[in-house]
Amino acid sequence: MRSLLMAAVAGLIIVGAVAATRTGVPTSTNATASAAAAPGAAASVPADLGKSIRAYLMANPEVLVDAMQELERKQDTQRDAVAIKAISQNEAELFRDADSPTAGNPSGDVTIVEFNDYQCPYCKRAYQAVKSVTAADGKVKIIYKDLPILGEPSRIAALAALASMKQGKHQALHNALMEFNGKLDRAKILETAASVGIDVAQLEKDMEDPKLKQIIDRNMALAAALGVRGTPAFVIGKQFVPGAVDAESLKALIADARKS
């Protein structure tokens, strides 16, 4: 937010300086000439002009809000354009990767790809929305992409979740980890696995499979291609959705995916 504010202020100062030259507000001819001679250098702003701009911004702070909102809108538009292109270029990795755990209807008419970290509180919030909406809608397929970005416990949880597929217990462990609200560590992850009927000794052996690290690395690369900046993040149909979603928003996104 601070960087957006600084960018907005900088933009307004430039606009103010240009406007000043057109409305008779005193400015420096030497500074203007210097800036023209050195395009990469920042032109100095005369003290009286700086005071005028500051006074205007203090009297009209809503201008900063408008500028920040416009900047965010442009950044979102650019992000979405990058994500849409990346979705098209990575369809196989997103939607047809046999190594990714799935849930819901395998033949669903809408697919939700979810990038998730088991320590992320926003992921846990979104989990409740995904769980309730997909339970009521039998035509949605879910594909899980583990993205352990919050430290070593996240990595261990991701490995355990992927390894649990060999025992046919991924969804049970996924749900249990998402519903756990305490601090995760290896012991707690294995305890949670045992609580859903997983053979922990076998799970620990399976977690050592180098293939699981490769899956996580692929997920990381895919997330980077899409412009994922944190968890959770979703691809719903062909639409990129960053951040947590509530149930009503998720229903609307699924409805939109069905229309496209």
Image (tube, grey):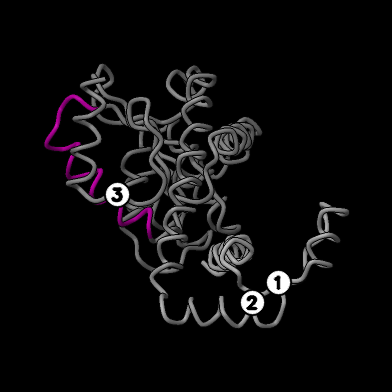
Residue at 34 percent across and 52 percent down: it is: 244
Q: Position of residue 127 (x, y in %)?
A: 30, 49
Q: According to the image, label 3 marks what residue? A: 245
Q: Hey, which residue is sitting farthest front in the picture?
A: 24
Q: In the figure, is residue 166 to the left or right of 38? A: left
Residues in magenta?
122-140
Q: According to the image, label 2 marks what residue? A: 49
Q: Position of residue 212 (x, y in %)?
A: 58, 34
Q: According to the image, label 1 marks what residue? A: 27
Q: In the figure, is residue 244 to the left or right of 81? A: left
Residue at 54 percent across and 63 percent down: it is: 8
Q: Amino acid at mark 1?
A: Thr
Residue at 66 percent across and 33 percent down: it is: 210
Is residue 128 found inside the magenta-colored segment of the image? yes
Position of residue 167 relative to residue 29, above or below, is: above
User: Foreground: 259 or 144?
Assistant: 259
Q: Quadrant of residue 259?
A: top left
Q: Position of residue 124 (x, y in %)?
A: 34, 56
Q: How far apart are the alpha carbons under marks 2 and 1? A: 7 Å
Which of the two marks, 3 or 2, is nearer to us in this view?
2
Task: Confirm or deny contact between disc 2 and disc 1 (CB under 8 A).
Answer: yes
Q: In the figure, is residue 108 to the left or right of 169? A: left
Q: Circle 3 sits in a helix, a strand or a loop, which is it?
A: loop
Task: Give the mark nearer the N terminus: 3 vs 1.
Answer: 1
Disc 1 crowd, CA 10 A, few/some/many (<14, 14-19, 20+): some
Q: Circle 1 sits in a helix, a strand or a loop, which is it?
A: loop
Task: Confirm or deny contact between disc 3 and disc 2 (CB under 8 A).
Answer: no
Which of the two marks, 2 or 1, is nearer to us in this view?
1
